[in-house]
Amino acid sequence: MSENKVYTRPYRSLFWPVLLIGIGVIWLLSNLKLIPTENLWILLRLWPVLIIVAGLDVLFARRFVLIGALLGLLMIAGVVYILLSGEGLGVEPAPQPRTESFSVQMDNTTRAEFQVELSIQSASIRALDGSDQLVVAEIGHLGDIVFTVTGAEEKTINLRQTGIGPWFGWLIPTIDKEDLVWEIGLSPDVPFDLMVDASTGKSELDLSGIQLDEFQFDASTGASTIILPESTVGYETRIDASTGSLEVVLPAESNLTVYLDGSTGRVVFDVPKSAEIRIEVLSGGTGDLRTPSWISKISGAENRDEGVYQSEGFDSAAYQLVIIIEDISTGNIVFQ
């Protein structure tokens, strides 16, 4: 009894090796200033070509191996030609950096929710001094800024950048020549629900003097510093760490609970000398927890990070700081 075997030609293509060589050629031509650096941003608009040519490669290169190489060469040659010609082909020039100002009147506002998505630029958030505005923002940016305000007595404010993703900033060299920063001021006279989504840029949040009902911070790859405000009643606080470095300065006279989800980055808590603190570690992960000698472990296995750590006078203190670490993950969490 014989079996009919169907021979299937293995998929081999020269398209991807040629593509890698082409990327190196473009990079070299850019470094040699043969391709104008202001034209590199055009690559943002040419990425669909890669999908089209890759699809043609899958269709035809299985049968004819050299077709993949030909497709790769044609694509690279076309991209290089467009990068060299730039505006001569009618391509729009790269977006230019600019600064815009935004503000929200106080009016009869009793509370506000402010949601901000930071970008590749450095950013600062702090309390306004001597202003009758609810929010004042000076935004240096590429792309477009979306700033919306809804509500009357209870306002919801959204701020974000569109058009230029944080991973594409290097394609636009003008960003290195401009001092693009985000400077945001919030009124100290109205309680805020503050939600901050960080990005690759450096962020400094000096929230001392700002009234917070709720605070959420989603870190990213950039370095961030947060100074939390004092509050006798406390406010809901959640911090999600990431791969970047994060420093959190805790208030001295506050009843405050902070929920932290660690990641691969380093998180440092600056604890005031007069503060009493309790640290609860729910999951240790593979990272490292470091505490000073005046914070003792009162429950949990000695050879594991999970457990409860506490300063000596915590139970009888008028102000208590509680840090709940949901997961240390693979990074380092340091109290100092």
Image: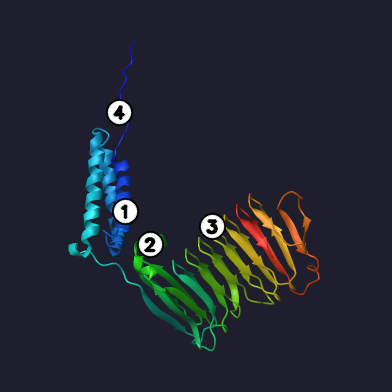
Left/right of residue 285 with respect to residue 106 in the rendered view: right
**Mark positioned earlier in the residue sequence (1 or 3):** 1
Q: How many marks?
A: 4
- Using the rendered view, name the quadrant where residue 18 is placed: top left
Q: Residues within 10 Å of mark 2 (few under 14, many from 20)?
A: few
Tell me the kind of residue under disc 1. Answer: Leu
Q: Position of residue 96 (x, y in %)?
A: 32, 71
Q: Quadrant of the C terminus?
A: bottom right
Q: CA distance from mark 1 to mark 3?
A: 30 Å
Q: CA distance from mark 1 to mark 4?
A: 36 Å
Q: Residues within 10 Å of mark 4 (few under 14, many from 20)?
A: few
Tell me the kind of residue under disc 2. Answer: Trp
Q: Name the mark on residue 243.
A: 3
Q: Which residue is disc 1 drawn over?
A: 28
Q: Quadrant of the N terminus?
A: top left
Q: Residues within 10 Å of mark 3 (few under 14, many from 20)?
A: some
Which residue corresponds to the image point at 26% horizontal and 39% vertical from the top-left? 68
